[in-house]
Image (cartoon, rainbow, N blue to C red):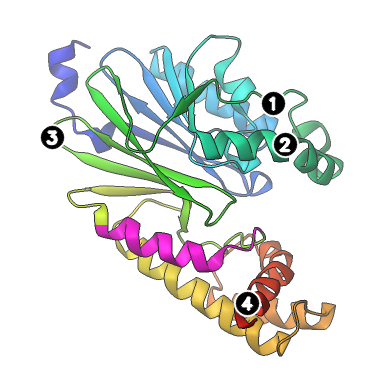
Amino acid sequence: MSSQVQRQVELTARVHTYASSEGGILANAYLIETNDGVVAIDATLTVSDANNLRELLNSLGRPLAAVLITHGHPDHYNGLTQLIAGTSVPIIATEGVDRVIREWDVRKEAQWKPIFRDEWPAQRTFPNHIAHDGESFVFGEVRFTVHDLGPGESHHDSYWIAEDGREKVAFIGDLAFNGEHSYVSDGHTSRWLENLERTRAVLTGVMRIYPGHGPSGGFELFERQRQYLERYRQEVQKLANERSTLTDVDKTRLTERMTEYLPEGKIKFLIAAGADAVASELSALRE
């Protein structure tokens, strides 16, 4: 396809979504076609999903130009080794995201490899290029700009805006989960709520928002995420009764209440998993 014809295709039509299996925590990775290559946003958690993502890339018939990482949770970078398949491409992340990946990778492997076994990549690949807040990178005719958020859903978040002169779209990582239960175990829900407000305020002109979990949408993703976090915090606060941890019985009740709130959510184990982190966070706010 010629460059001229490619430019006439809407940017949203050139975004390919790979939605991981439930075993891969339903994480999204994205492939964006440019005139002369493909830019990936995030990778996946498991070996199988990473191999499938690579097959999707191969089907596009264009070389991988770069990989952009939104944050340092393994379900968004674990599959980098399989995705790049021995090629040398820029893997770009902010300094904070890169630091979290490197600091937590060994601990995440110790925590999750006994569960995932051979599906946990034996070799993980890390970012090789550090981006600064507001820095842009041009691949083909598409400009990608990173925005640093600091702590939020993870210990350090960022999001990327892609624009081609006609359309502008945003890849927000786990700033908002669309229709799925949220990972709150890093204990930064107050900052997460702040990030939602300030990000929504600056995404003027964005046509489509692509989250790290669930289907793409519009600005309603931010409001739904705000409501979910506030409800989760309220339920934890009631069950904790000023304690910094919850009992197993409390966590079961929390799971029941949040499942009733979001019955379509599939990754329910995240509900109880984050209870103590949020209880501790809320307890510290009272001190």
| Circles 3 and 2: CB atoms closer than 8 Å | no
Q: Is residue 235 above or below residue 75?
A: below
Q: Quick one: SS at disc 1?
A: loop
In the picture of the structure, the residue carrying the numbered disc 4 is 282
- The mark nearer the N terminus, 4 or 1, is 1
Locate the N terminus and report the quarter of the image it occupies. Answer: top left
| Circles 4 and 2: CB atoms closer than 8 Å | no
- The mark nearer the N terminus, 1 or 2, is 2
In the picture of the structure, the residue carrying the numbered disc 3 is 166
Closer to the camera: disc 3 or disc 4?
Answer: 4
The three-letter amino acid code for the residue at tag 1 is Arg
- The mark nearer the N terminus, 3 or 4, is 3
Q: Measure the C-alpha gap from mark 1 to mark 3.
A: 36 Å
Closer to the camera: disc 4 or disc 1?
Answer: 4
Dominant secondary structure of the residues highlighted in magenta in the image: helix
Q: Is residue 135 left or right of residue 185?
A: left
Tell me the crowding category of disc 2: few under 14, some 14 to 19, or many 20 or more residues within 10 angstroms, Cα based: some
Q: State the residue at coordinates (53%, 80%).
A: 231
In this view, the residue in front, 140 or 33, is: 140
In the picture of the structure, the residue carrying the numbered disc 1 is 124
Q: Quick one: SS at disc 3?
A: loop
- The mark nearer the N terminus, 3 or 2, is 2
Q: Which residues are magenta?
A: 186-201
